[in-house]
Amino acid sequence: MKRSFMQRAAAAPHIVWSVLFIIAPLIFVVYYSFTDLDGAFTTENIGRLFTSNYVLIFVNSLCLALISTVVCLVIAYPLAYIFSRMKEKWQRVMVLLIMIPLWMNFLITTYSWMTILEDTGIINSLFKAIGLDPVHMINTPGAVVVGMVFCYLPYMILPIYTVMSGIDPKLLEAASDLGCSGWHVMTRVVMPMSLSGVISGITMVFVPSISTFYISQKLGGGTFQLIGDTIESYFVGTAINYHFGAALSLVLMILILLSMAVMNHYSDSEDEGGRRIK
């Protein structure tokens, strides 16, 4: 069916936006990744990524992103279930409380955690007040994980809650009437039906976690590098190298696309399973 002139006109701004801010930047990234300072084609930038230093950086980034995603899921899943079982009025209140951190400036949030985790910060001050020795928390991988979990937790809770709130309570009652215990209701009814929300939440947390750089800079204190920090160092500062920075960005983008493809595969499988059950 042919689209009308008004339909094409309405789509034009979106097409222009996509070309300027999605397609064009990707073309530049690929171009710089496979060229040298003289603009000649080269694979040296990509080959350099497979040295031990950069492999370690990618592994560290992947590990911290996975840990943060798992912690977010462990915290978010029971919270989302509890919220979904509340009365509608209280559900709106809980969702509002979850969204409030998203309205705060990212910079302020990170600096707040620096104040909390410093050697002379709030937590260690409380330890001293009750006679305990202070604990060094700032400038460690654990501090980075805490920062990422706090910043990205709402992105895990909201999609899971959205799916769970759509589950008909009669299904849970029917499962209980048929002899299912509370554990079996959760594992055989709630979990399978909320899988799409879990997959969406994992994707929304893992992608920014693996590419973050500001949280690791401030809470990690530069004691170790993640892939986001490394990419930034080649675009800003004294060691500017757009070509190698673009190569790092390209590899990171490929990793993110692969992870999203895996998540979408399981999401599609879950949807097909749901249709077969119906």
Image (cartoon, rainbow, N blue to C red):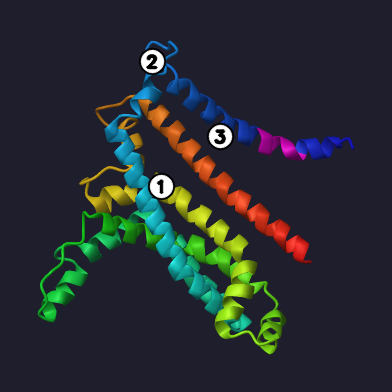
Res. 210 mark: 1
How many angstroms separate mark 2 from mark 3 (CA)? Answer: 24 Å
The quarter of the image holding the C terminus is bottom right
Label 3 crowd (10 A; few <14 / some 14-19 / many >=20):
few
Q: Quadrant of residue 133?
A: bottom left
Q: Which residues are magenta?
A: 10-15
User: What's the residue at 68%, 85% (across, down)?
Assistant: 173
Res. 21 mark: 3
The residue tagged with tag 2: helix, strand or loop?
A: loop
Whether residue 170 is situated above or below residue 116 in the rendered picture? below
Q: Position of residue 216 (x, y in %)?
A: 30, 49
User: What's the residue at 22%, 45% (across, down)?
Assistant: 222
Question: Which is more toward the observer, 67 or 277?
Answer: 277
Q: Position of residue 60 (x, y in %)?
A: 32, 46
- Write down the residue under mark 2: 36
Q: Quadrant of residue 219?
A: bottom left
How many angstroms separate mark 3 from mark 1 (CA)? Answer: 22 Å
Q: Position of residue 67 (x, y in %)?
A: 38, 57
Residue 204 in sight in this render: yes
Q: Position of residue 265 (x, y in %)?
A: 62, 49
